[in-house]
Each structure stands twice: as C-alpha cells, then as structure tokens.
C-alpha cells in the first residue's frame, strides 16, 4: 500500500483509438454468419424478475419510483449509527423478516439471503416455472454478492468482542457464507444444476448474470436464476466504507460537477434467464433478450478505475452481441457519484461509441437506490428492462451542475420517454474488474 | 511542541513516500513525492491516529475540504489547528 509500488495512472488515450474500436466492432459483425444462433449458441430470454431495494419491495413499485425519479436514500437506522460519520443510505426501511419467513428459516437467513429469496419468489412466480423432473436437473442459480452475510459477521463480532461472550449461535457460518443465498434459492426451487456465487465487488451481479447467460446460451442449462444481493448497511459495513473517504454525507449525484461521493444501498435483484425456445414453446412472456456479455480486467490499480479497461468491456459486450454501436439507445451506467468513476466511465463511453456517444442516453439509478455493491447490477438491470419494455428511461437524479468531463446525455432528474431497441448495463468493480451486459428488445 | 508535531507529521508522510524525512520540503505537494490518492488517504488516517484528531477529508473533493492538502506545509498548519482545537 505504498506510493512507489503502485503504477501511475495510464496516460490519456489518443483520439485515434475511437475509430479503431468502432471499426473493429463492424469488422467482427461482418464476419458473423447471419442469424444469432451461429456457432450453435442458443438465444436467452428473460422471463421473470424480482427485487427488494430502497425504492420498493417488488418490480412494479421500483419501476414507479424510477419513473417518478424518487429518491430512496435517507437517514440510516440501525444500532450505533451515531458513531458513524456517514448517516445516509438506500436502506430497505421497516424490514421485518417475519412477514416473509418462518422462525426456522430466519435463524438461517442473513438479510442478504432474505432479500434474495423474496426477489427470487417474484421472479419465479412471474416466469410461471415449476422445476420438476428434467427441468430441475437442467436449472441452476448464479448470484453475485461482494460480502455475503455482513450483518451476521457484525452481530457476532459484537457478541464476542464487545460483549465478551464466548459462545455464538450454531448457524453463524451457514448464515454468513457468500453462497448462502444461492444455496437457499436452489433448495427452495429444487434447482439441481450448476449453482454458485460470484464475488467481484461492485461487478458481482453483472459477472453472475453474464455467466448465467453463457450457461443458457451454451446449452449447459435450460434455466438459470441469476442476479445478486447485498446488505452491508450495519455499523461495521458502513464504518469500513468510511475509511476510504469516498462516501458522500448528503447525496449521490452522479455526473454532476457537484458530486462528492457514493452512497450505499441494500437489496437484491433476481431474474429468470431461460432458453429462448423453451420459453417460446411454453408461451412465456419474454421481457427482454440477453444478447451479449463481456468481462475485462484493468490490471492496474486496486481502487482507481481505468477508462481503457471499461471501454474494452463495453466494446466486447457489443461484439459478443453482434451489435452495432449505433443500435445502443441507453446505457445504465455504473455511475457511482465519485469523482473518479464518473469521468472515467464517460471517457470510456465516448471512446467506445465515437460520435454516437452524443446520441445515446446514459443514466445512473444509484442516485435513487444507492450503490448496492455486489447486488447493484441486478437492481440496475431493472432500469434496462424498463427502458426496452416500457420505453421509459430512468433518470439520474440529484443532478445540479454540468461537468465538462461528463458531457453525455445523462437524463438529468426526470425520466424520459424514448423507444430504444438495445441497451447496455455497465459495472466496474474495485480491483479493476469490469463486466458489461447487452440486452435487446423483444 | 510545534517542532515535534511537524517532525511527526513529516515522518508519517516520509514513510508513505518511502523517503528520508530529511529530504522532505514543506513546499512540496504530496503528488511531488509520488503519493497518489490512496497513499494520501492512508497518510491522513495515520495522522489522525497519531494525534487523535478527525480530519475532514473527502477524496472526491480534496480541494473543497476544510483540510488543505496542497503542500506538506499546509498539511502541517491544518493539523496544528486541529490539535490546538482539541485543547
């Protein structure tokens, strides 16, 4: 952690690179055989979605809040909050697990698992799937979380360190482990195929959904439940983030010249990714098509983002989707509201899209639901689906003043009606791990 | 007191920059010494721990913070103020 062992930031990119990226994308598209199933790949449908987050406890209420540009960020409420320097977050208020789970379940479910299971119930119900027989064997779950059962860690450290007790509840380990949520989803629905958890900090959900997409696309699974969850709004969780000095004390204002940091959120998003033909054959309502995914690593700095790494993931997702940059009408930005992310992300988008960057819309819904860390990509996927399905672009709220380094159409403060046929969702994690997903309208 | 305080601050910054404290000049900026944003946050933490003070610093808007980090001299002055305010 000392200055000399870290490499300096990359020098600014030359404008020539713009042409190169888009030309490369076109050349690749030219080479693809007509039809998206070339190479034996299967098409992937989204047939169910569910969520719990600061804006609502289901998809309709979350969509409504995004349409209204409502802010779900408010005063944090939990034990010892007065000892924190940061007092705001996108907290799921009034959460009472007894409304959803019985006593035997609650003793095993950390809050990140509770959020996941509630979101999964909504998604599976919407999809109308029953995982019996062959389907159960060909179905799995891949979820993202950065830190798993943080509340469980926090409560039990308090018990042994602060209260000096020498005994903890027997289920501490199965409750806090990162794969607890994925495992409980598999048990709830009898998903007998590939199931695991991905932890890549703020990109966890996008990595998870990208892997689930590839699992269905390759034919390794017929249905995958996927998305992610996070719940670190507790004393230890927020205290750890305070240390980095990147948190805002008053609001999340992505892309605004007045932005002063990120605001944490909590919650979950879960989706049903289903083999297209399977979905069509049973007459399922297809919400959107997942068409591309790309991952890249900056291999540069543990916290500072790289425009080149982000650009490679953005361009890669379009290549994977056989998508012309000009098709993309909306990008759900990573848009954390930090000084570093927002200008780096805008630079990456400008380079990846060339002149089209000025014609597309890009917004950060973190301004409304906060940064759900490992769960954030899953909740943000909802804004992508809303854009494709309802023709409504969720706004970046809290926007006060233009920043010349973020000179894109960031859909300030008010949602906008617009028909878009293709969208991207960006996630760029600490550690330089980038994951971008591409969706198309059905 | 003031000389001791300055010496300790410069020792903390020198350790972060992996330099001899004697090499540090008060008019140098942290960047001049090769200290990046993460290194700066770590130095501020070390100073807070050393003097039991809380430094108002947000890495998103270092220039808007009440705590002037433009040079080593300004950091020393700002820490002196915070230590004095503590009483």
Image: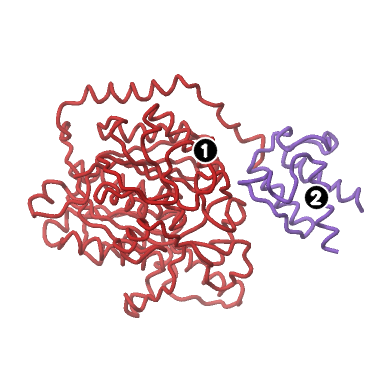
Chain colours: A red, B purple
User: What is the quadrant of the N terminus of chain A in the image?
Assistant: top right
The x and y percentages for residue A146 are 44, 54
Front residue of A66 and A18: A66
- Residue A19 lies left or right of residue A9; in this view the side is left
Q: Position of residue A352 (x, y in %)?
A: 40, 30
- The residue indicated by pointer 1 is A343
Q: Chain of mark 1?
A: A
Q: Secondary structure at mark 1?
A: helix
The chain ID associated with circle 2 is B
- Quadrant in which the C terminus of chain A appears: top left
Task: Point out which mark residue B78 bears.
Answer: 2
Please give left or right for residue A64 compared with residue A153 in the image.
left
Residue depicted at x 46% and y 52%: A397
Judged from this view, the residue extending furthest toward the left is A281
Examine the rendered structure and indicate whether residue A415 appears above or below residue A237: above
Q: Is residue A100 above or below residue A342?
A: below
Q: Residue at x 44, y 43 (%)?
A: A428
Q: Residues within 10 Å of mark 1 (few under 14, many from 20)?
A: many
In percent of width and height, residue A98 lies at 36, 79
């Amino acid at each position: 952690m000392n200055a000399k062992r870290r490499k300096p930031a990359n020098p600014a990119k030359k404008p020539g690179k713009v042409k190169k990226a888009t030309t490369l994308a076109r050349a690749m598209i030219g080479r693809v055989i007509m039809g998206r199933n070339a190479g034996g790949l299967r098409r992937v449908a989204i047939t169910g979605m569910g969520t719990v987050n600061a804006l609502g406890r289901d998809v309709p209420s979350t969509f409504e809040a995004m349409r209204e540009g409502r802010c779900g960020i408010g005063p944090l409420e939990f034990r010892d909050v007065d000892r924190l320097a940061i007092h705001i977050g996108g907290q799921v208020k009034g959460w009472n697990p007894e409304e959803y789970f019985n006593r035997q379940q609650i003793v095993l479910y950390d809050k990140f698992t509770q959020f996941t299971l509630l979101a999964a119930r909504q998604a599976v119900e919407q999809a109308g799937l029953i995982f019996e027989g062959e389907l159960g064997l060909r179905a799995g779950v891949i979820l993202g979380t950065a830190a798993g059962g943080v509340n469980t860690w926090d409560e039990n450290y308090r018990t042994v360190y602060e209260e000096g007790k020498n005994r903890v509840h027997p289920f501490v380990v199965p409750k806090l482990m990162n794969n607890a949520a994925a495992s409980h989803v598999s048990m709830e629905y009898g998903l007998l195929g590939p199931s695991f958890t991905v932890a890549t900090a703020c990109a966890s959900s996008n990595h998870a959904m990208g892997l689930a997409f590839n699992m269905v696309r390759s034919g390794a699974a017929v249905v995958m439940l996927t998305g992610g969850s996070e719940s670190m709004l507790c004393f230890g969780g927020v205290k750890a983030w305070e240390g980095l000095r990147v948190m805002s004390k008053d609001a999340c204002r992505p892309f605004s010249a007045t932005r002063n940091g990120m605001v944490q959120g909590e919650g979950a998003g879960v989706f049903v990714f289903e083999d297209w033909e399977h979905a069509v054959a049973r007459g399922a309502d297809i919400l959107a098509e997942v068409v591309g995914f790309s991952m890249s690593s900056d291999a540069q700095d543990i916290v500072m983002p790289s425009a080149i790494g982000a650009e490679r993931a953005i361009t890669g997702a379009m290549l994977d989707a056989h998508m012309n940059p000009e098709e993309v009408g909306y990008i759900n930005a990573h848009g954390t509201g930090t000084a570093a992310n927002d200008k780096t992300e805008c630079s990456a988008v400008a380079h990846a899209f060339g002149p089209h960057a000025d014609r597309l819309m890009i917004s950060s819904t973190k301004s409304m639901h906060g940064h759900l860390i490992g769960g954030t990509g899953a909740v943000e996927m909802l804004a992508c689906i809303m854009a494709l399905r309802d023709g409504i672009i969720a706004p970046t709220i809290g926007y006060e003043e233009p920043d010349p380094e973020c000179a894109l159409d960031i859909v300030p403060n008010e949602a906008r009606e617009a028909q878009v046929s293709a969208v991207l969702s960006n996630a760029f994690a600490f550690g330089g791990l980038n994951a971008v997903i591409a969706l198309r309208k059905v | 007191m003031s000389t001791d305080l300055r010496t300790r601050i410069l020792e903390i910054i020198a350790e972060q920059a992996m330099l001899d404290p004697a090499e540090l000049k008060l008019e140098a900026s942290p960047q001049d010494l090769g200290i990046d944003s993460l290194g700066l946050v770590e130095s501020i933490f070390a100073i807070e721990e050393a003097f039991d003070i809380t430094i108002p610093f947000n890495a998103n808007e270092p220039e808007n913070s009440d705590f002037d980090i433009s040079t080593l001299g300004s950091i020393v002055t700002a820490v002196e103020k915070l230590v004095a305010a503590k009483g």
